[in-house]
Amino acid sequence: MIERIIDWSLVVALCFALGWLSGRILGVHRSAWRSLVCGLAGWGIGFGATYALHETDITTPAAPTVIGFAVLATMGTSIALDLVLTPRPRRSRRPALHSLVHPVQAIKRRFAVSLRLREIMRYARNRKLTSFRSASTSMLESADFAQRLRLFLEDCGGMFVKIGQIASTRSDVLAPAMIAELSQLRASVRPVPPDEIRVVIESELDQTVEQAFASFDWDPLAAASIGQVHRAVLRDGTHVVVKVQRPGIEDIVERDAAVLRWIARNVERRVEAAREARFAPITEELITGLEEELDYAHEAAAAVVLGRHRSPGEGVAVPFVRADLSTSRVLVMQEVPGESIDHDAAIDASSVPRPELARRLLAVFLHQVITDGAFHADPHPGNIMLDEDGTLWLIDFGAVGYLDPLMLNSLQMLVLGVAMFEPSLLTRAVLRIAGTNTTVDRDSLETDLSLLLAQQARAGGFDPRSLGDVVTVMLRHHLAPPPAFTTLSRALITLEGTLRVLDPDFEVGHEAMTAFAEGRATPAAETKDQVQKELIRALPTLRTLPGHAETLSSMLEAGELTMQTRRFGADDAVVIGDWIDRILFTSIGIAGLVTSAILMLAAGSSDEGTARVIRAVGYAGLVVSGTMLMRSIAQILTRRAR
């Protein structure tokens, strides 16, 4: 009995090694289970083929004939599985060492994800969202599907509601019906008990609540999915709000993020419309944004940046942060007086007229974008407060957009191109924003941007919302706008709605151009400076240009000017060389297969000694040439899967 177990263990190990070896030969990655399945199938086919050829019992598993047929059969099985099963995209995972050091946590996490996935699949079946394999783009944009999805997210609760709320701002990629439904999501979250809030605060601040604050209101001012807010008074009498992260929220976010990635990956793999809408990358972007919100240090830093860089005009303020009492899970900020501009009564009671409030908010936002490169990325009415003096306060800095120097320079060039009504300058700015200057039809791109400029002219001036139209033009020309640019586009759309709340008759395009002209934002006030910057950049080239022209003209007169062109550039030569190598590799494999077959046939008409040699050479050639052809097929399938 023990000997049989040992024999079977050796067979399984040998089959696994055979499957792993075939994957290495084919140049593809194979999981342990797939390697074992391929090895078992190949070993069985190898035995069967050898027995059929020799019509005798096979007693030596390591016989060369069996090994040769087994290798070929294993590679064939591996390729057949590739044809049937679509390879799963690989993503970053926790290091294996973490699971070894914390095995109990790893097991609990694995079971939590599985149980959560089963629960979510049940909700999806209840909302009839599991039968959209053949869904079209029009179906996914329908109001019925949007309503089903919104109800599904409400059923799931937790981070799914938060993800839906974030997705409701993605009007650049989602249909209007979807945006309308997702905007109805409201997180109804049970407040965390005071004892648990106390534990979080005291563990983060390393002191008791009574030591840190003169008074603390344990009734939450607001409760959300990630944290909740309490009023408090510092020892110096300053009124503050304390944002405390919910206990265990990191594990919940990690669990739901794993489930969301699994859903997005499978939906995109099975639904063509989801692939066209880039469902998986959008989901990953939303998850990344949500994970960043877990660290309140980012929000504190953003508040400091926006408080330091703001419009030189009066009327807009940012609450200060108490850095000595703020950590990654606790955020202490100045309590903002006043009410949200969601309340019409607060706006009507202000001493500042509605149009002026809207102009101030637009001016500070444009100044943040064009000059500072840091802007509030979610300026909806709930994130803007109005006090009795008519000062607008920006709050909630969980979503802040940052523009790097290159993006900021490109954006300034874009606005300059609009202000000068120059399509070529606008085209150059768009290409710099996309980070490419090739593989695009510049004439066609410039034509589309020129039409966009014409629309702006008919509308009476540059409308900041038109950045969304620029994103649409970029996508049409297969130019990928960077995340910062799409974030800005979404923020401008949100800002327009907020400005309408302040003043229903507010003309965004006209007021934006007025702000530019008055110097409250950049283009018209800094057009001269921008032109000077461009001239300074081009100055070294302009200084050497006369000398180069004189040298070229002298060589031309002397008949020494020659010109050489290369048929293939460096990248083209590599690609073409790769094609030739693959064609030669496959051709040699086919020739070897034909030659091996001829040798096998010739062995039948030769004497026993010669036939044995010819048959051995034929078998060897059959294995080698078959391996070469299998590798070519495997590489083709691998490239298609990408």
Image (spheres, rainbow, N blue to C red):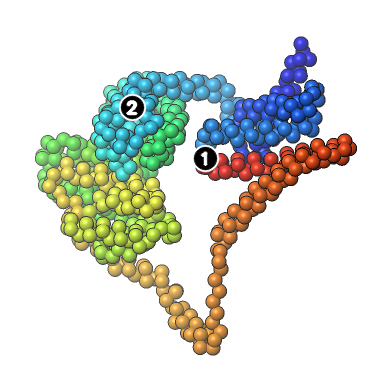
Marks 2 and 1, Cα distance to the nearest angstrom?
A: 31 Å
Q: Residues within 10 Å of mark 2 (few under 14, many from 20)?
A: many
Residue 161, image x, y percentages: 33, 29
Mark 2, secondary structure of its residue: helix
Task: Give the x, y percent position of residue 374.
Answer: 34, 50
Q: Is residue 215 left or right of residue 6?
A: left
Instruction: Look at mark 1 in the image and give the residue it sits on.
Output: 641
**Residue positioned 37% across, 29% down in the render:** 132
Callout 1: 10 Å neighbours few (<14), some, many (20+)? Answer: few
Label 1 is placed on what type of residue? Ala
Decide which of 617, 607 is in the foreground and name it: 607
Q: Is residue 251 above or below residue 279?
A: above
Report which residue position mark 2 lands on: 153
Residue at left offset 43%, top offset 20%: 118
**Residue 413 seen anywhere in this rendered image of the structure:** no
Residue type, mark 2 in image: Leu
Camera-side residue: 37 or 114?
37
- Is 558 rendered above or below residue 198? below
The residue at 62%/50% (across/down) is: 582
Left or right of 571 in this view: 130: left
Residue 625 in picture, x, y percent from top left: 70, 43
- Where residue 94 sits, quadrant-wise, is top right
Of the numbered discs 2 and 1, the one sitting upstream in the chain is 2
Eyeballing the image, is 434 above or below 155?
A: below
Which is in the foreground here, disc 2 or disc 1? 1
